[in-house]
Amino acid sequence: MDKPIEEASAQKGKPPEEPPKPPPDPGPKDVTIIVNTREKTVPKGKISFERIVELAFGEVPTGDGITITVTYHRGHSDHPQGSLVAGATVEVVKGMVFDVSRTDRS
């Protein structure tokens, strides 16, 4: 069956409908990680050795003979486990576990 002339001409002049646009990116999201058995919430993305140490001890311990070791597991699929050294960063994911220890050499 043919459409009435008025309806057909109204549809011809109408621009095609565009698909809805996705909402804007809300920005960084927080993830929960575990540092020395305690849950910590941090922004998604990279985290530094120094920030992990701050989360573990409140501040970065300094002094002669102090050695800090940071290891992690349950990490991103590219690096699911490993260790960090001063100045290094790693991509955090939800549930990632960090173990931070301090050794004083006397």
Image (cartoon, grey):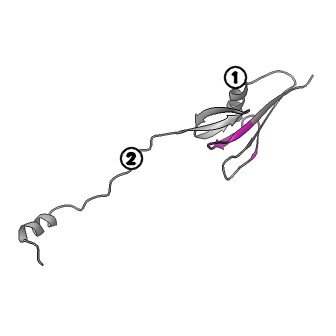
User: Few, some or many C-alpha atoms within 10 Å of disc 2 (few <14, some 14-19, many ≥20)?
Assistant: few
Q: Which residue is mark 1?
A: 58
Residue 95 on the magenta span: yes
Give me the residue at 40% from left, 44% from top: 24
Q: Of the residues shown, which amino acid type is indicated by label 1?
A: Gly
76 left or right of 83 in image: left
Direction bottom: furthest residue: 1
Q: Of the residues shown, which amino acid type is indicated by label 2?
A: Pro
Instruction: Estimate the x, y position of residue 26 in percent, counting from the top left.
Output: 45, 40
Pick whichever of labels 2 and 1 is earlier in the sequence.
Answer: 2
Judged from the image, the secondary structure of the residue bearing numbered disc 1 is: loop
Which part of the image, by quadrant, shows the N terminus?
Answer: bottom left
Give me the residue at 6% from left, 67% from top: 6
Give me the residue at 7% from left, 71% from top: 4
Which part of the image, by quadrant, shows the C terminus?
Answer: top right
Judged from the image, the secondary structure of the residue bearing numbered disc 2 is: loop
Instruction: Estimate the x, y position of residue 78 in percent, counting from the top left.
Output: 68, 53
24 left or right of 13 in image: right
Q: Quadrant of residue 73?
A: top right
Q: Which residue is mark 2?
A: 23
Magenta span covers which residues? 81-98
User: Few, some or many C-alpha atoms within 10 Å of disc 1 (few <14, some 14-19, many ≥20)?
Assistant: few
Instruction: Estimate the x, y position of residue 16 in percent, counting from the top left.
Output: 24, 62
